[in-house]
Amino acid sequence: MVWGVSMATTQDRLRVLRNELQFLDRGGYRSPIVWRSPRIFEDSPTCPKDRWSACPHGDCVLLDFVPQERREEVIPCRHIPLNEGGESLFTLYSTGTNEEIQETLREWLLKTIAGLEQATQAEMPWSSEKAS
């Protein structure tokens, strides 16, 4: 990260989000972690920080999805708006069940991946869609 701007590419974002979706679909958040439920993003392979340590901010592709005013939070990825209502993990942890949270995350991942894939196709002048 340079001057608050992530250097992650669209391909980096897609890779991370696809891995996160795969982790979610394989039940990664259903495995109990001794004394608490797994935390979305924080307890997955997506998170670049060591478990139980502070967020490294600059090394995290997810920071690109965090609203600017929330990027200095202790755990910024908890503030990513996951739906049209602006719910985030921060709000869902106090109002939703694990199943509701995971379904909201899954919908956000699918929508965000599709949007990034569209953007990638639009950037490639040689794509099959442009050639037809």
Image: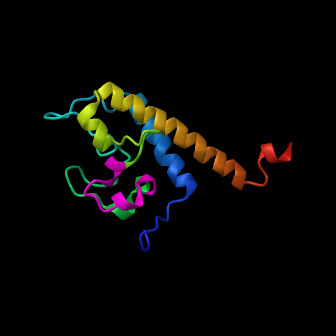
Q: Position of residue 38 (x, y in %)?
A: 25, 36
Quarter occupied by residue 26: top left
Quarter occupied by residue 21: top left
Specify the quadrant that holds the C terminus: top right
Q: Relative to 121, is 104 on the left or the right? A: left
Q: Position of residue 122 (x, y in %)?
A: 71, 51
Q: Residue at x 38, y 47 (%)?
A: 46
Q: Residue at x 31, y 61 (%)?
A: 56
Residue 47 seen = no
Residue 33 seen = yes
- In the picture as drawn, the residue positioned furthest to the front comes out as 85
The range drawn in magenta is 64-79
Q: Relative to 118, is 70 on the left or the right? A: left
How many discs mark residues in the rendered view? 0
Q: Position of residue 86 (x, y in %)?
A: 41, 43
Specify the quadrant that holds the N terminus: bottom left
Q: Residue at x 29, y 28 (%)?
A: 98
Whether residue 1 is situated above or below residue 92 in the rendered picture: below
Q: Relative to 24, is 97 on the left or the right? A: left
Q: Position of residue 29 (x, y in %)?
A: 31, 32
The front one of 103 and 24 is 103
Quarter occupied by residue 94: top left
Q: Residue at x 44, y 73 (%)?
A: 2
Residue 104 magenta: no
- In the picture as drawn, the residue positioned furthest to the bottom comes out as 3
The front one of 61 and 82 is 82
- In the picture as drawn, the residue positioned furthest to the right comes out as 132
